[in-house]
Image (cartoon, helix red, strand yellow):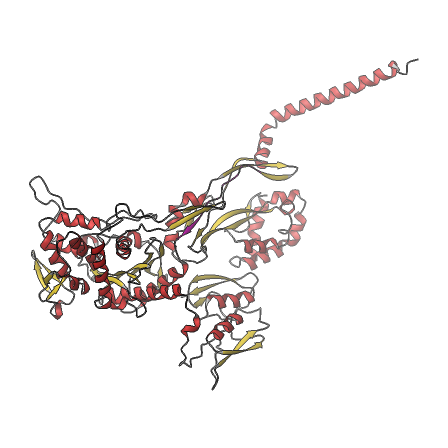
Amino acid sequence: MSKFNNQKIMPRYSVICMLMTIISLGVLIKAGYIMTAKRDYWMKVADRVKRDNVVIQPVRGNILSCDGQLLASSLPEFKIFMDFQQLHDAGNDSLWDAKEKLICKGLHEIFPEQSPAEFKANLDKGRKKMSRHWPVWPYRINYNTYSEVLKLPVFNLTKFQSGFHCEELNARENPFGTLAERTVGDMYALKDGGRMPRCGLELSFDKLLRGTNGVGHRRKVLNKYLDIIDKEPVNGCDIITTIDVGIQDLAERAVIEELKQPEVNGDVGVAIVMEVKTGDIKAIVNIDKCYGPNGQIIYKEIKNHAVSDLMEPGSVFKPVSVMTALQDGMCDTSKIVDTGNGVWPMYGREMKDHNWRRGGYGVMNMATTLRVSSNIGVSRIIDEYYHNDPEKFVRGVYRSGIASDLHIPIVGASPAKIRMPKKNKRGEWLNWSNTALPWMSIGYESQVPPISTLAFYNAIANNGCMMQPRFVKASIQNGEVTEYPPQVVKGHTQIASPAVIKKMQVMLEHVVSEGLGKKAGSTSFKVAGKTGTAQISKGSVGYKSGMTHYLLSFAGYFPADNPKYSCIVCIQKGGLPASGGGMSGVVFHHIAEGIMAQSEGRDVRQARDSASVFVPQVKNGNILSADFVLSQLGIKTKRNYIANIANTSALWGQARSGTHYVDLVHQGVPSTKHVPNVMGMGARDAVYLMEQRGVKCRIIGRGKVVKQSLPPGKYIHRGETCTLTLE
């Protein structure tokens, strides 16, 4: 007998089939309803939970100094927002109501620019609108500040519970502040939160530094947002520059100190240091005198004068003229020329030497004309040999390489402009006059940027081989290094014969040892170079526009017997006194002495004067650093651990009879409630004291603290930032 009972099973089966059919019809009807009547609603929902073709920004590459120190780096910055709809969906409205007052108070402590009431009004406005992306703070914040915000109530929950979320953005930071600012370059913000390079290497090497964007999309899965990467971004390359941080800092300080001198009061200061054999730019300084909002004088970089200023170079151009005459075989260094009493008529104009009021130089040879920088001597020699064929002279100038395009990788750089004489069909000069050649020979009638002048002097130091100035020597991506080797300027492997180069080297050395460039020299090593003092033409008004303006220059190299570095210093100023050797030469001296001291690696103990009894002042700060410095200077120390120092700017340097030693006072238990007085301290000690009390520091400038934004003795609020201005 069969166990299958057809009469019982079939009715049950029929009922199940009918139920399945009804459910299927319901699903189809519901699907059709959603696809038609509710289509617009669900499309809006879909737009909120997905995004296609999302651009994923790569990390911008770093800019490094020649020894690997960071000159520019990408760091994360954040913009913070609240999703009040998510807060409501998570059922945490009551928690927000209970904690809102604490949240606003905490935000005020982190961002003291706004009061708790202002924060509350802003957040209540966003909550009323049920905004999904309401800004908590309108500006970018760094990671440390973002971490502080995350500690606040509600914000410390997950973003699905609190609705608090952020946008992470790349920020460009310069760890050395304004050091080589116009050469390294900077970035400016776009409306969409991105950044674009403005100038310098950031702009010139943007393609390498920027990398390649990635592509992704966003989906909401199981109530969570997932960012799905379709194409990985390719991070930018790091570039290694030729800039030496130590030499750059040394050169900047030397230029600024000279511009500040009352007798100088310079408007613009430029200094470039180049490595002779490679053409590597070790330092490039462009300082402008500016005026702050309160009329105070500020020195900072605004324009890259070193590569873009097309100005008449003055007497630093004279070696080009002399070398041209020697190379063409027109004469030798023993050529005799009469300069008279310092004033010589030339085609209706008067040529003057700098000492014309003292009777001039009289008769001298060519080597002496360069040593004493005689305008009459050099111009008369050049005019004698090239008056009928000035084109030959200008071809010789071009042969020297000073007018070559050096392909400087800085936007705004320009090669020198030295006009070539031209004749018409009748043999008459079209763009030339009788006075053009004499004045061109002494550095007028031409426009030459400082870096082109330096390249010429560097070539003399390099035995006639002109090197192309190099700013970047390598790029690195994923551990792979691409080298950019030193290059010789095309067609200038030898700007003159070895014999002529040797004569030029001897004459330039005598300019410093015996002539007008003595202040650029050193007692420790030989220096060679040439001074220059030129009047600056002020556009359409020419040279006579009220106060006379001057370009003071010194270009040369050191050590003269084995050149390692070449350097040019240019200062623009108004009025007298004006001396290329006495002002720019002094800056050259300080730079050369500092570089040689660094390269020789002298020990700090060699700087001690055994006959001196001076005991340095020691300010409160990092006790270990102070102890080390004093010990290296041979001064004995003992440490006193004193708690709760009231006046942190007091001096503890104390000289005692007999053996000299210093009491070092250490803050064992510093007061954490009041802002310390850090005026006059260095950056390291000032930051050390501030951060001991929980105050964040922002540094502007270099040197000693001359201003602090939080007054001494002020009660410290949590998360406060103090801006320290150093000079």
Q: Position of residue 662 (x, y in %)?
A: 50, 79
Question: Hey, which residue is sitting farthest right in the picture?
Answer: 1
Residue 104 shows in the view: yes
**Where the N terminus falls, by quadrant?**
top right
- 262 over 94 or under it: above or below: below
Q: Position of residue 73 (x, y in %)?
A: 47, 52
What residue do we see at 50% from left, 65% from top?
687
- 603 over 214 or under it: above or below: below
Q: Position of residue 672 (x, y in %)?
A: 58, 68
Quadrant in which residue 40 is drawn:
top right
Compared across the picture, whether 578 is left or right of 431 comes to right
Q: Position of residue 365 (x, y in %)?
A: 13, 63
For the residue pair 578 and 612, the one nearer the viewer reads as: 612
Residue span colored magenta: 228-241
Question: Hey, which residue is sitting farthest front in the picture?
Answer: 499
Badge count: 0
In reply to whether residue 462 is colored magenta, the answer given is: no
- 184 over 714 or under it: above or below: above
In reply to whether residue 230 is colored magenta, the answer given is: yes
Compared across the picture, whether 317 is left or right of 726 comes to left
Compared across the picture, whether 285 is left or right of 85 comes to left
Residue 536 shows in the view: no
What residue do we see at 44% from left, 77% from top?
616
**Where the C terminus falls, by quadrant?**
bottom left
